[in-house]
Each structure stands twice: as structure tokens, then as C-alpha cells.
Image (cartoon, rainbow, N blue to C red):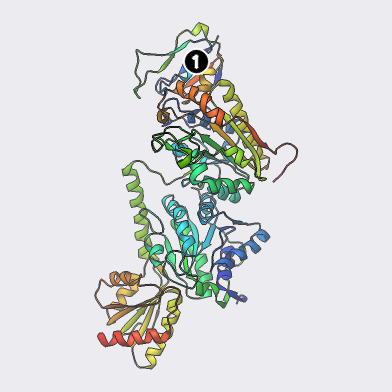
Amino acid sequence: MARIIINQDGCKGCEMCVNACPRHIIALDKEKINGKGYHPAKLLDEEKCTGCCSCAMMCPDCAIVVER
Amino acid sequence: MSERFLMKGNEALAEAAIRAGCKHFFGYPITPQTELAAYMSKRMPKIGGTYLQAESELAAANMVLGASAAGVRAMTSSSSPGISLKTEAISYMAGSDVPALIINVQRGGPGLGGIQPSQADYWQATKATGHGDFQILVFAPATVQEMVDLVSDAFDMADKYRMPAMILADGMLGQMMEPVEFKEEGEKVLPEKPWAACGHHNQRKHNVVNSLYLTPQALESLVKERFERYEKIKATEQRASEYLVDDADIVLVAFGASARVAHSAVDMAREQGIKAGLIRPITLWPFPTDCLKKAAQTAKGFLSVEMNMGQMVDDVKLAINCSKPVDFFGRTGGVIPTPQEILDRIIKFGGEL
Amino acid sequence: MAVVFERPHALADVPMHYCPGCTHGIVHRLVAEVIDELGVEGNAVGVASVGCSVMSYDYFNCDMVQAPHGRAPAVATGIKRARPENVVFTYQGDGDLAAIGTAETIHSATRGENITVIFINNAIYGMTGGQMAPTTLPNMVTQTTPYGRDVNTAGYPIRVCEMLSTLDGVALAQRVTVDSVKNVIAAKKAIKKAFQNQIEGKGFSIVEVVSTCPTNWGMSPYDAIKWLRDNMLPYYPLGVYKDETKGDRLK
């Protein structure tokens, strides 16, 4: 059991987390635009998240909290 | 009565600073202030203080910025070309409300200029010790004893008003020897600095010592607040000494070394029956406008005597609102005027009044 | 479930102004994590420099001083000499540290000043809009080298860690990067060591972080990381250039 919580307002849509995720389960949410004007990242499949923290470690904006 | 010492001006400045509680000196060698740094290098290690010879005047002044930002009394000293380099940090200190003491033992300029005594940094000290809207406190001692006394006052006022202070001396005062006594006895109790960046120890929000304000309105209101402080200083901290001014027809205005010569010239004039007097600004900023204004009610004219091309003349004119004629006599490039030269000018000026 | 990764306490909970994908943010977090782990937030004083990281005084929760361009090591020297008990670090970019502040960098290093220097090398002036930096690579296009950096007229880049490693005063000079999870972990280890050295009184420690500037490089953050690997790392090899901290070296 693991999950990530992405601060939607803090995300700048840089995709560093998208590229860092070894399970390829993070993508930008094209349906949404945050206050800064970016498509924020979102977790596509909570079941597959292992809580490895790769996404959070590569996030330049400290916008990801990981729970496990 | 405390002990009297025969000391060189530069060394007296250093000893006075130590007795005023300054344990952190950052310098860079330059003539004619080098004895000050040398004295510090001898004394500081013995009192557990810091003497550091920096790689440049830029670095030295920025070390002062760091030490002062961390809440201790810190100082640097230099001479004219070196002060130009220090203006970077002085502007940042003014913009961050950080107190510090800067000593300028002036020599001739511009450029590398010369190494003989000069007062050619008056404009720099009082109008623009760096970029931006700010002032610093500027003190102009005329004796070695006054150098000692003003160092302590400059540190205290810098702390009180949270701004840099400068002792504007010159090569003559720095190099001459006179007897001095030190009023500071024992360890000085220094004011608390709750704004300092020295670790919040989880007791308060973090302190930031900073001069960057990207919102124009925020910067404007901060600068305005600072200028309100300056107005308060102008109203309360002006200092000048007066000599035979009350009945004087011609009032000489001179500071520092040139005031010593002007004093002799006044005596010579009086011997000839010319009613001359002397106002000696001790604070150059704030400029002692009040006593000049008062003198303008009775004097017929003012003669500014300086070791430069007439940098203080406009301040004298402004102080008296151009209500009386203001003449100027000066020597520059490291030349010290003689009393006779000044007397000749007094006589000439008197004839024109 | 328990929280296994979150914002370190020493990193202020405010949005940072950095461009999307800028690695400044990662390095800020690593510094803050190290401050947390060493328990020195209450005792730390950071020195912000001039450049993109100028506003880092708002991002770290410890006390901060903002220094003039290039003078951060001089300001840090003043703080450290005044308050030896404080943990003092600078956070500087390449223009600040290796151009206008070269003298301050070299002399604080050679004095063995007991401070920690975090140096971001992204080969460009970011804040002013992408001009040539002292670390701009040969032939690299910037706003002020529009035809590529011509070494015949603009000279060669400075390899800071290599240069500083010749100085006796340096305790640690290490180059890291943050292009991958593995390297982020290694970078943090180096930063921690640089702080630990100071706490143990071992003298000047510098960690150079080879970084990206996607905006001024004109690339996506992903492409910038690739460009860093292909171009920056060959010119600026990662590694420990000086480590005098083994044994009981004391300043």
C-alpha cells in the first residue's frame, strides 16, 4: 500500500516526476489547469505505486508527499 | 583622571574601537591608514577578537557586512581609493539597516591620486557612499583625542539608528601623535540586536538581513521609513564646535585637519583686529545647519576652508539659505593650507563684504 | 500508511520562483534535508547570493543574509568569524561564484574558512536572461555568445572544483549532479558531508552541483537533463577532487 499526494497548486508541470517514475504511472492531467497555468501531475494508478519516492526526489518544487 | 597615552592617530582609532567593544576588524592595506590595521593585528588575537586581512577592500567591507549582520560590532578602515571599493558593501549595509564603522583616512584623489592628506572625499562621504537613496553618519575629528571619542559615539549611533557610520579623517590626523585618554573602561555593554542573523535557535521566526525588494511600493515605503529616521537624526544629532563666532564678521567653516589651520588663521586675524570666527562641523552628516543658521544672523560672510576644491561650500550656502556671501579657500592634491594663506583670503574676502 | 517523504522543515512552505524543471529546487530541498538531519536549523545562517537563487533567503527557514554579487563567501566569513558556533553556508550560482566572486571564492577557500559552499553550475546566467557564464561550454550558444562561445575571444570555462583542489585550505571539493534519483542521493550525501565538516571544524567545503537551466538553454526539462548528461558531465566530470577530511584534520 502506497500513494503519492501531489500539491496541485505547487506543481509546475515540469514532468520531472513523470520521467522519474519507474512504473510509469504519473502523467500530467491535461483536463486541469492550476492557478499558475500549468497542467499538474497526477497519479494514474494508485494500485501500482510502490512508494519508492523517486518522483518526490526529482520534484524541484517539493510538491509531492509520499505515504507508504 | 584616567591615564594619558601619546599615540598616533591611526593607532588611537584602533584602540578606541577595541575599547568600544569592537572585536572584529576586516581590512586591506593602504597608505596612509596602515598603522590602524597593523595595530589591530597585534591587539585582536590578545583579546580573542578577529583581525583578518582580506583579499581586497571589496571583500573586507563585505566581511564587515557579514559580521555586523550576525550582530557584533565590526569595522573596517581604508583610505580614499579603498573606500571607493567599499561603497558596494556600504550601500548594501544601508539598504539592510546594518550598523558598522568605516574609517576613511583620506588621501588625495581622484584615481590613485597621492598619499598626502586630503579632504577630497567629502562629497563621497556625505552624498554618495554607494548607489541608492541613503545616508551614513559622518564624523570629522580634528584631534587625536576627538578621534578616540568619536569612534565610540559612531559605534553607538550606528547601532541606535541601524546604519553605517564613517569617521572621515585624513592622512595628517592619522599620522600625527598627540596625548589621548580613553574614557571607556572595562568591558562595554552592547545593545541587544534582535534583528541579527545569528541562528533563531527555534525561538523565533527566521531573521533575514536583506536589501532586495522587488515590489516598488515596498521598496519605496522602506526607503521613506529610513528617510524619516534621517530627519530625526538631522534634528537631534548635529554637532559642531564654535570658536569666537558670537561677534564674528567673517565665520570660517572648516572640519578636520583644515579646521586646525583655520583656527590659527582666526587667531592671526583677531590679532589684526579682524573679527573672524570658526565653525567646525564635527558631524558632516548630519550637517550642522542649526549653528550656521544662527551665525548667519550676525556674521557678514562665511569662508569655507577645505583641503579639496570646495566640496562643502554648497552645504554652507544651503545651511544659511544663501543669506550671506560664502567664499572658499582650499588646497588640494595633498597640500595642506597655511594659516597665512587663509589669513590673506580672510582679508581679501573682508574687503569685498 | 505513514508519510515517508515530505517537505523538510528547513525548507519554507512557500512556492519557489524557479522555472519549471529547474534543478535549483532539488538542491534547495537537499540542503534543507541535511539541515534537518543534522538538527542545525536553529543554528544555521545561510548566505544568499545574486542570480536566480537571490531569493533563497525566503526559502530556507534558518536565518539568512543576502550578499552583494559574488561576495557571499566574504559575507559568510564575516558571519563565521563573528559567530563560530553558527553553521554558515553560502548558496551561489556560477556567475556569482566563478566570475564576479572569483577572488572571494579562492581566498575563503585558501584561508580554509570553516564554511560550506553550495555551488550551482548550470553554465549560464539565469536571472538576467541567459548570458554567457564563466562555466559556459565551448561553442555553447547563449544570449551573449549568439554564435556559440568562441574560446579564442571569450576564453575557456573554469572548472572550479579542479582549481580549488590545488589549495591547501580546502577540506572538501566535490562535484555532483541531480539528473537522476541515484545522483540526487549521492548529491545529498556530499552536501551532508560538507556541512558535517564544518560542524567538526575541518574547514572549507564546496559541493558543486552540475545543474540545468531549461528556460535559458531553450529546452524542456527532460531534454535539459539529457543535454546535461551529454555535454556538461564530460566537461565537468563528477567526483571528489579533494577530500582532506579523513583522519583528524582540524583547522
Examine the rendered structure and indicate whether residue C127 appears above or below residue B99: above
Residue furthest right as drawn: C247
| Residue wearing tag 1 | A4
Q: Is residue C205 visible?
A: yes
Q: Amino acid at mark 1?
A: Ile
Image: C171 above or below B74: above
**Residue B251 shown left or right of residue B76 in the figure:** left
* Residue B157 visible here: no
Q: Is B177 on the left or on the right of C249, as rendered?
A: left
Figure quadrant of residue B7: bottom right
Q: Is residue B306 left or right of residue B102?
A: left
Which residue is most to the bottom? B272
Report the residue at 51% width, 34% height from top: C121
Residue sitting at 48 percent across and 73 percent down?
B117
Name the spot of residue B19 as percent of width and height, x first: 59, 65
The correct choice, above or below, for C37 with respect to A15 in the image is below
Q: Chain of mark 1?
A: A
